[in-house]
């Protein structure tokens, strides 16, 4: 059994997509074991997104590729771009309530990333949350000096999942229950 962290970001909440997102997750067979609706504090928003070089460069590399794949010119230094996107993200997280949650199931991290889709909605496949419910792109977001509005955040690795779950949830906020279809889905 694996656990992952999934959060509806302010655009997802304000667009009324909470139910739609969790409908897809629940019907896939994955189980919600913790969930709440909160306004993040300034400190939480500031501390949530990593500041390390690798994370910043990765934002830069993904953004550059997104631009170049569409024949657009990418004009930033990779790390500076990462820092810029990070500052937009922190402000964005403070712009409304969010719904952090913990999802459990076999290969939960990989399965949730599949349900969520690519970071840039323009590239995300139809059938994924980001592909079905957003038309945003790096180019448009950057012109408007804001992060890509892609409805949800989802952990990308075991290490991130553990860190993010512990960042948003205390031990006593977890539940433990059996879904009636658990036997059919995961064989236990
Ligand atoms: P993901 O959320 O798919 O794991 P990242 O960790 O790379 O993606 O980025 C975190 C968030 O930052 C994204 O979900 C998106 O909202 C925003 N973001 C990422 N890259 C860009 C970009 N090039 N321009 C604007 N916003 C971006």
Image (tube, helix red, strand yellow):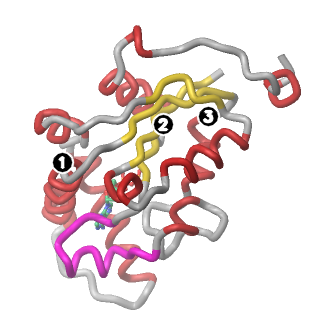
For the point 61% across and 61% down, the residue is 128
Above or below, comparing residue 62 to residue 97 in the picture = below
Q: Is 42 positioned to the left or the right of 35 in the image?
A: left
Of all residues shown, which one is farthest toward the top? 172
Task: Give the percent coordinates (x, y) of residue 51.
Answer: 18, 43
Labels in figure, total: 3
Query: What is the secondary structure assignment of the residue under circle 1?
Result: loop
Q: Position of residue 35 (x, y in %)?
A: 45, 29
Give the magenta part as a residue range: 135-148
Q: Earlier in the sequence, mark 2 or mark 1?
A: 1
Q: Is residue 155 above or below residue 10?
A: above
The span from disc 2 to disc 1 (Cα, nearest Å) is 25 Å
Of badges 3 and 2, the one in the foreground is: 3
Question: Mark 2 highlights which residue?
Answer: 157
**Residue 96 percent across, percent down from the top left:** 24, 50
Q: Secondary structure at mark 3?
A: helix
Q: Secondary structure at mark 2?
A: loop
Disc 3: residue Cβ within 8 A of ligand 1's nearest atom: no
Q: 38 or 78, which is in the foreground?
A: 38
Which residue is identified by label 1? 94
- The residue wearing badge 3 is 108
**Which of these two is toward me, 143 or 84?**
143
Label 3 and label 1: CA atoms lie apart by 27 Å
């Amino acid at each position: 059994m694996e656990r992952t962290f999934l959060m509806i970001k302010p655009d997802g909440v304000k667009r009324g997509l909470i139910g739609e997102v969790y409908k897809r997750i629940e019907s896939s067979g994955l189980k919600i074991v913790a969930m709440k609706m909160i306004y993040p504090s300034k400190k939480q928003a500031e501390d949530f997104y990593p500041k390390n070089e690798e994370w910043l460069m990765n934002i830069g590399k993904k953004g550059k590729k997104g631009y170049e794949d569409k024949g657009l010119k990418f004009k930033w230094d990779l790390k500076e771009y990462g820092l810029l996107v990070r500052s937009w993200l922190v402000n964005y997280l403070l712009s409304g309530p969010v719904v952090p949650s913990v999802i459990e199931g076999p290969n939960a991290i990989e399965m949730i990333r599949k349900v969520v889709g690519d970071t840039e909605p323009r590239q995300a496949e139809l059938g994924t949350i980001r592909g079905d419910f957003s038309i945003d792109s790096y180019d448009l977001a950057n012109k408007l000096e804001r992060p890509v509005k892609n409805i949800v955040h989802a952990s990308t690795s075991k290490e991130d999942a553990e860190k993010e779950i512990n960042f948003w949830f205390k031990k006593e906020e977890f539940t433990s229950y059996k879904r009636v279809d658990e036997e059919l889905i995961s064989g236990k």
